Amino acid sequence: MHAWEPELEAALARGFAWWARFPIGPDAEILERSVEYDRAWDEHFQDRPCVSLCLFIVRDVERDCRAAQLALTHDSVLSG
């Protein structure tokens, strides 16, 4: 995260920052690590104009549980 700090600060100086992730899953270990990664980004940029298009989870058999977990650090969660 800190390696991207200068780039993100420059984007924030222009108005806002956004980023997106690639599809992940269904490996539970990767999903858990990714949730932790997203939580760290959320804490780092809390109350700042940032948009994150994440996590793109595919073939997750625990979709409802995972959606509830992700909702803790995201304004919206799409599940379907």
Image: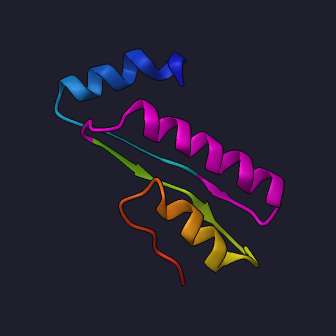
Which percent across, then down, holds residue 39?
54, 43
Which percent across, then down, holds residue 53?
44, 55
Residue range corresponding to the magenta coloring: 22-49
Name the residue: 77% across, 51% down.
Answer: 30
In the image, farthest residue toward the bottom: 80
Which percent across, then down, holds residue 80?
54, 84
Seen in the image, is 29 located left or right of residue 23?
right
What kind of colouring is applied to the model shown? rainbow
Name the residue: 60% across, 53% down.
Answer: 22
Q: Is residue 4 above or below residue 75?
A: above
Task: Say which of 27 and 48 sits in front.
Answer: 48
Q: Is residue 47 above or below residue 9?
A: below
Task: Say which of 14 and 70 sits in front.
Answer: 70
Residue 23 lies within the magenta run: yes
SS majority, magenta: helix
In which quadrant will I find the N terminus?
top right
Q: Is residue 22 above or below residue 25?
A: above
Q: Is residue 69 above or below residue 37?
A: below
Residue 32 lies within the magenta run: yes
Name the residue: 61% across, 40% down.
Answer: 37
Task: Say which of 80 and 43 sits in front.
Answer: 43
Seen in the image, is 47 located left or right of residue 40?
left
Name the residue: 51% across, 55% down.
Answer: 54
User: How many labels sit on residues?
Assistant: 0
